[in-house]
Image: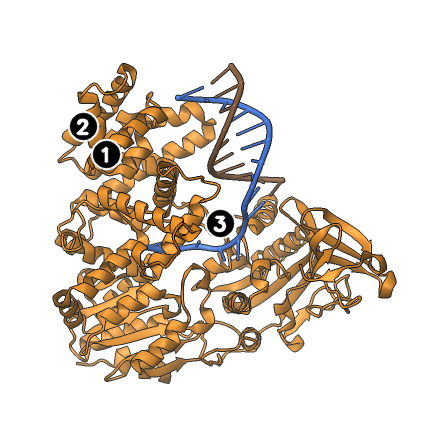
Chain colours: A orange, B blue, C brown
Amino acid sequence: MDVSHLLDELNDPQREAVTVDDGHVLVLAGAGSGKTRVLVHRMAWLIQVHHVSPMSLLAVTFTNKAAGEMRGCVGQLLNLRPEGLWIGTFHGICHRLLRMHSAEVGLPDTFQILDSDDQYRLIRRVIRDMELDEGEFPPRQIQGFINHHKDEGRRPDGIECFDHSFQAQQVAIYRQYQDYCERSGLVDFAELLLRTLELLRDNDARRTHYQERFSHILIDEFQDTNTLQYALVRLLSGPQNRLFVVGDDDQSIYGWRGAKVENVSHFDRDFSPQVVRLEQNYRSTETILEAANRVIDHNAERMGKNLWTEGDRGEPIRLFAAWSAEEEAEFVIARIQDWIEQGNKASEVAVLYRSNAQSRLFEQALLREDIPYRVYGGLRFFERAEVKDAMAYLRLMHNVNDDAAFERVVNLPARGIGQRTVALVRDHARANALSLFQAARELVERNAMSARAANAMRVFLTLIHELTETHRDSDLGEALDAAIKRAELQAWYESREPPDRAEARSENLAELVRAADSFDQPFEDEQAGLSPTASFLAQAALEAGEHQGERWEDCVQLMTLHSAKGLEFPLVFMAGMEEGLFPHQKSIEEPGRLAEERRLCYVGMTRAMQQLYITHAESRMLHGQTGISRPSRFLAEIPAELTEDLRPGTKAAPTAVGRAPEPADGLRLGERVRHTRFGSGTVINIEGQGPNARIQVNFESAGSKWLVLAYANLEPGG
DNA sequence: GTGCGACGATTTTAG
DNA sequence: ATCGTCGCAC
């Protein structure tokens, strides 16, 4: 068979990676070096040249989008229907395994996936049930605690703590939460992985089975794996099968959510793979690449990699120092207008920023100029309240024992079931190991609640019962539509929200019914014995959908640097390049976190194909007060010969880009100081030099003050 | 059960 | 500034 088409379009290192004959492979793939292509061609190569059955390949990604793209590419390249292929996210694949072995891991076959919002509500519920103070145990923090430990593979028993310590109390909440999940057949995201890990760890036969079945395992974005995911990979790798791992330590930007860059070097240590470096970049101009390389060079402990291109030098990177965040936005929008006037598309432009709050000024400016735009971030389709409300009804129709769903809609729309009544139901459920639905039914039957409460509860129980009975065999869309209509959700939103909000909600509900109507159950779900409803519910949790609707319009893209990873744009703006914002204040102290910010900067810069603008503002409003900041240190790491200063000699000049102002008495902007009366604060402005210098300090408790340095008696630190 | 004012937090986020 | 949550009054 002629397989030259699999190699034709590849460069030497890509070809080498694709064709490695034995052993494990680690591909260090720089930004824009064609890693997806390598992964896809590798799979095709294995199938066509080594005659590996498509069924014995396992390809793992981090996002559904990436999985979908990979699936599409492989299908196209091999001209086969990609349905049977095991390509998916860690969570998707673990979910599939758990469905197939639910009994073995002690889960009911109707088990439901909790998304983060469900999980949060449940944790809050547990804290209240335990009669603990939510101020002392903030649910968000506890959620972080639980997920963190699960991501590290720890059950409550595996967490060390002293009796009666704060830690011990957190562990107690974790334990209680886990009990609750078990009783109601609920599984959170981390649990999907942890259960699968335990299944493979504790069951030799199963482990061996999957090790033999998946002769080749391919993993994308390896720098994003957490402890649990790496442990899972290690369990899946047996003596026979082979791992093909692709990653870029320079693009690791998710350390804060548990990702371990070290996994890349640990993989090198643990598996002695053949290492292939992809360093030729097909995306950016030489200038942009060179600048990005020089910035990332400031990080220690890199695996070492230097991107190069055969492309043109291109235009210099343009720097702009604005007086204010407003002026910065105006500048950016004016450049976007130029771009569009030159006949380019708005969709080729991305404005990248560090934090979501920054989007507002750009939105306002774009709106003013009538340029269409799209903001990434915010709630996704299946995360919207009205969609989750309707889905809770569907969940109850699927499994009346789904307590999370019960809690959500037992009194939504309000039908006279108050906190007292629900508390009664919860107590009864807990005491008798029943689900909330069962407990409610028992209490009603036994006349164990007030007549009024019992009547209200009866209405709800009957509603769910009827819906379940009537739509046992209905199509998904029909069942969902019936639930929405019978529960009168629309009227509920209309009665208590402004018309435009209510209208948006009812549009989303209509969209939900349409989505359910056109839902095509994945072949593998059907094989795993899932009902269409179960499939739909799982998908809703596992892929929460798009952020916004009109995605095909030609519009400017506004997003955080994080969400830009993996994307590319001809024209990129990186805005708000200021100390304290980027690198973020909370990351400046620790070297490790600062290095991650620098990688984020590297990721941002390497999104740009042709032109890159980097802007910063002297003053901007943050948390309701205007602050002064100096340019980000990352700007100083870009060689001057690669840049063009669009506004030289402004106020930023004495503070020349990136260079810190000459210290007045050793003090610099951004430095922490302590004052005997005002406490500790941050230096936000310095005027003059020597003992007569005046210094503005933003004190934590006393607010912002101007002080004469000679009399201020400031101590460093604080 | 609902509405409103006080209070506090506020980096990044896929599944 | 702005948004979400909580507690209290009606």
CB atoms of marks 1 and 2 within 8 Å: no
The circle on residue A572 is none
> Percent x, y for residue B12?
49, 55
Residue A65 locus on image (x, y percent): 34, 58
Which of the chains bears the disc numbered 2?
A
Amino acid at dot 1: Ala
* Amino acid at dot 3: Arg
Q: Is residue A285 above or below residue A506?
A: below
- Give the CA distance from mark 3 to mark 2: 43 Å
Q: Are marks 1 and 3 in contact (CB under 8 Å)?
A: no
Give the residue at mark 3: A374
Q: Which residue is mark 2?
A: A465
To the question of a shared chain for discs 1 and 2, the answer is yes
**Quarter in which the N terminus of chain A is drawn:** bottom left
Give the foreground label among 1 and 2: 1
In the rendered structure, which disc, 3 or 2, sits on the residue that comes first in sequence? 3
- Name the residue furthest front: A163
Count of picture labels: 3
Q: Secondary structure at mark 3?
A: strand
Q: Are marks 3 and 2 on the same chain?
A: yes
Which comes sooner in the sequence, label 1 or label 3?
Answer: 3
The structure residue drawn at horizontal position 59% and vertical position 64%, both measured from the top left corner, is A589
Which residue position is annotated with label 1? A431
Residue that appears at 72% across and 46% down: A702
